[in-house]
Image: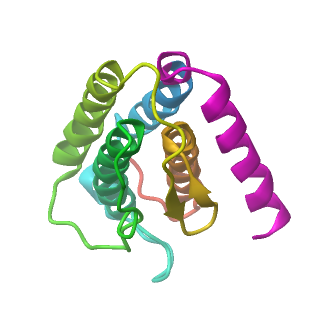
Amino acid sequence: MNPEEQRIREYLISQGKKYSFKKLWTRAISARLELIKEIEDITQDQADFSFDKDEWTISEILEHVLSSTGRVNQLISELANGNAGDSSDIDPPRKITNSSIEELRIGILEGAFEWTTMTENLPLPPNLDKTANHGFFGDIHAGAWYLFQRVHDLDHLNQIKNNKSHEKYPSRK
């Protein structure tokens, strides 16, 4: 683990233990709202734009966020309830999507609603002894996984902004 990953790990673990899920909700949901705002006006051409074969399109990024969010949501619920959680497929690989940008926007918004519902249904107090492994951050508890979603959304928000700032990014027609 490099120093930056270690710093983020410590943040996730300490803050996820210190604060309740309801207190952490504003941090997690604010990142999702930034993501929603960033994609609200993009066209299908813009969503499918790639400036390099190794760079993800906005559509691919959103498909990834949708898949990952559902898995993280389930994992947090399992861990917080004291059950073993499977994190082996938590970070799905790049996948070409057949979903339109409108479908992806709706999915990202619905994911925010599902996140809120999941938060409301978590036990008080949650189990923080059970952990699941993250590929970069090692074994982390439910609170750390909860904050991980914020970090994940912000990373992909920056990836989207990077695509949008490229000189060849299509203009809005």
Q: How many numbered marks have been drawn onto this rendered protein structure?
A: 0
Residue sitting at the far right: 3
Residue sitting at the far bottom: 53
Q: x, y (%) of residue 75?
A: 35, 49
Q: Using the image as rendered, state which of residue 37 and residue 65 is in the foreground.
A: 65
Q: Magenta stretch mostly in which secondary structure?
A: helix
Q: Quadrant of the N terminus?
A: bottom right
Q: Is residue 157 visible?
A: yes
Q: x, y (%) of residue 123?
A: 36, 24
Q: Residue at x 58, y 59 (%)?
A: 139
Q: Residue at x 57, y 42 (%)?
A: 144
Does residue 13 belong to the magenta stretch?
yes
Q: Residue at x 35, y 26 (%)?
A: 122
Judge whether 61 appears above or below 42 on screen: below
Q: Using the image as rendered, state which of residue 92 and residue 44 is in the foreground.
A: 92
Judge whether 76 appears above or below 30 on screen: below
Please identify the quarter of the rendering in which residue 42 is found.
top left
- Type of colouring: rainbow
Q: Residue at x 39, y 33 (%)?
A: 36
Q: x, y (%) of residue 26?
A: 52, 19
Q: Using the image as rendered, state which of residue 30 and residue 5 is in the foreground.
A: 5
Q: Is residue 95 left or right of residue 156?
A: left
Judge whether 68 appears above or below 105 on screen: below
The boundaries of the magenta stretch are: 1-25
Q: Is residue 46 visible?
A: no
Q: x, y (%) of residue 93?
A: 38, 74
